[in-house]
Each structure stands twice: as C-alpha cells, then as structure tokens.
Image (cartoon, rainbow, N blue to C red):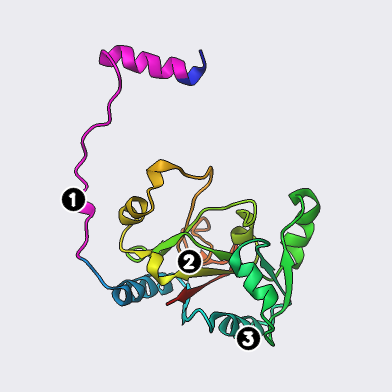
Amino acid sequence: MSARDSILQRLRNRSGGELSVPECDFSVLQRPVSSVAERIEQFQKTIESVHGEVHSCTRDSWVAQLADILSARDARCLLVPGAHEIGRRLREFEQDGLPELLIYDEPIESWQPHLFNNVDASITSTRGGIAETGSLILWPTPDEPRLMSLVPPIHIAVLEASELYATFHEAMQAQSWASGMPTNALLVSGPSKTADIEQTLAYGVHGPKELIVLVIE
C-alpha cells in the first residue's frame, strides 16, 4: 500500500466508510450575466491597473498589430509555438515588421542559454481569461512550455474574446476542469512584480517586464 493509499484508508476508517464530497453552495460566486463587450472592458481595466497592456484585434488584423507592437520595441526575435495555430499563422503570414521567428524545439539543457539571454519576446495561446481579476489562464504543453511565458522580457498572449469569463469559478465550470487538468496550470495577472525589497512594489524585476494581450474579437 502506498503512502497515499495509507492516508486515505486512515481517513475512511475515521469517517466510518467511504469519503464523500460535502455539499457546497457556490451561489456567492455567481455574477450577473454580462456581454462580451462588458467582460472585455472589465478585463482591460483590471489588467491595465497592474501594468498589463491590451489590444483589441480581429482574426485578420492581429498579425499586423503584433508586428507594429514588436517593431515599436525593436524586438529582434519572437519565440513562437511550433505546432499551435498561432505559430503556424505567423510562419505562413508574410508581414513586414515581424522579427526573426524562433521555435522552442530542443531540450532545455541545450536551449537554456539562448532562451535566457537572446530571446526578446514570446507569444503563447491562452485557455481563457477572467474579467474580474484581469487574469489569463495558461495550460503549458510540450508545444508551449511554461518557460515561454516566464522567461522572455516581453510575453504576448492571444486571448479569444469568447473565452473570457466573469470569474474563475465560471471558467472552471464552463471548461469542465474537474474532468482533467494538466500537471501545471498558470494564472497570469500582469507582468512580473515583487514587493520583497522594503515592501515596495516593483515591476519587471524577474520574469516578463511586459505583458501584452491580444484580444481576438
């Protein structure tokens, strides 16, 4: 019997039988029905309050807007997913202003020095967003490893407006998180920040200095 099974068995013995999930009232987490436009407005206001940046785009315009954003920052290269539609679209789209496109397609041991020292920006997909807290939901995959959103100075996230939820609870219910989750799920609310030094909030001390969200409407 494993340590986990042993702990669960002791709990069952104390409870007199099988463990059951207690009834919970989540009505306090419910919010009034809101439109997509209202959720976008709330999300933008909240995330911009912590130095995030939001751009509204269409499915046809987001690549051109991305090129302008990166050109204004003199980005030399952009790390993109290899298999995801975002990466494929960028590689296939001939757009002036896009920097060199890189793919994270080798073991971290050989890729780490380049990733930490030479990559200016990265772009990832998202699993959705939370309007109330101004948060992005990221589920890292082998195609979009966690370091893509944690290391480059500029992190660009693509968010579908239809996947912007009012609350965290609503997102978990709508996407059936209980049926299966990754080993690592991330909630990103703005660029990196810390208050370790004299309890003074500082941005960009470690991790991305900028978080740019492209909302596809």
Choose between 205 and 149: the one closer to the eye.
Answer: 149
Q: What amino acid is labelled 3 in the image?
A: Ala
Earlier sequence position, callout 1 versus callout 2: 1
| Disc 2: which residue | 190
Q: Distance between the residues labelled 3 and 1?
A: 46 Å
Relative to 40, does residue 197 appear above or below in the rendering? Answer: above
Residue range highlighted in magenta: 5-32
Q: In this view, does 188 lie to the left or right of 100?
A: left
| Residue 115 point in image, percent of width and height | 73, 61
* Residue 180 among those drawn in magenta: no
Q: In this view, does 24 lie to the left or right of 92?
A: left
| Disc 3: which residue | 72
Earlier sequence position, callout 2 versus callout 3: 3
| Disc 1: which residue | 27
Residue beneath the point at 77% across and 53% down: 106
Q: What amino acid is labelled 1 in the image?
A: Ser
Choose between 195 and 50: the one closer to the eye.
Answer: 50
Give the structural element (helix, strand or loop) at label 2: loop
Residue beneath the point at 67% across and 85% down: 95
Q: Distance between the residues labelled 2 and 3?
A: 20 Å
